[in-house]
Amino acid sequence: MNRITWLAEQFQFTYRQLAKMLHVSPSLVHLFQNDKRNLPVRNQALLDHPLFAPYPIREEMALLPEPEWEDPDKEIRILETQMRWNLLFLEKRKVSGQLDALKQRRLVLHRVLYHTRDLPFSYKGGESLIEMKWIVLKIEAREELESLTVAERRKLEKKIFLIDAEMQLMDQWLEEDKGPGSSPAEGLQGNA
């Protein structure tokens, strides 16, 4: 295998990078790689250096152990993740409360409409003061029900789903970093 081809395949060098290393033009490197031109003697001597010699690098690297990542800011990253998890937990409780309030409000409005199903939506005259009050409540309930769209509910449900997904991912990260039994959820449950 040609040394230029090997370097390009194994190390993702471009013709420009190789040309810069060998102090020649990129077109000359391209021509040399296609066996259409020879490199000058001085450049050929650089290319003949043992560092440029092809060898089965992938097979040799497969025998090496997996590289370990150095993480000097591990403790800071864990604390930041726990803080983010706690903020998401609070946000989830807030959004869940909003969703529950939305569902409860919808139920109350349906109850008002059901309770006043025999009353008209407008005054006909001769209604008592209490009937007039219930007619007003019925009109307001219908208007509010029309304003409560499914899109609002879906938006809150989607937000809860996304928060849950992010919290699960953070739990997974923290378990990888600290070992089993160290998720912030357990810390919160222990405090409750």
Image: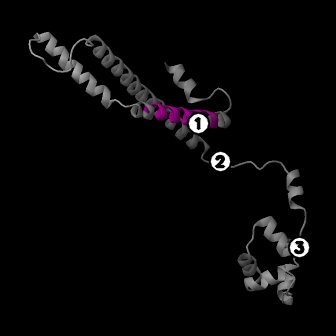
Q: What residue does disc 3 label?
A: 50
Please tell me whether mark 2 sits on a helix, a strand or a loop.
Answer: loop
**Mark 1 nearby-residue class (10 Å; few <14, some 14–19, many ≥20):** some
Tell how many labels: 3
**Mark 2 nearby-residue class (10 Å; few <14, some 14–19, many ≥20):** few
Q: CA distance from mark 1 to mark 2?
A: 17 Å
Q: What residue does disc 1 label?
A: 170
Looking at the image, is 37 positioned above or below residue 155? below
Which stretch is magenta?
Answer: 156-173
The tag earlier along the polypeptide, 1 or 3, is 3
Q: What residue does disc 2 label?
A: 71
Q: Residue at x 33, y 17 (%)?
A: 110
- Mark 1 or mark 3: which is in front? 1
| Residue 27 in the image, given as x and y percentages of width and height | 75, 84
Please tell me whether mark 3 sits on a helix, a strand or a loop.
Answer: helix
Three-letter amino acid code at disc 1?
Answer: Met
Three-letter amino acid code at disc 3?
Answer: Pro
Looking at the image, is 59 positioned above or below residue 145? below
Q: Quadrant of the N terminus?
A: bottom right
The tag earlier along the polypeptide, 1 or 2, is 2
| Left or right: where 22 falls relative to 145 | right
**Mark 3 nearby-residue class (10 Å; few <14, some 14–19, many ≥20):** few
| Residue 183 in the image, given as x and y percentages of width and height | 60, 29
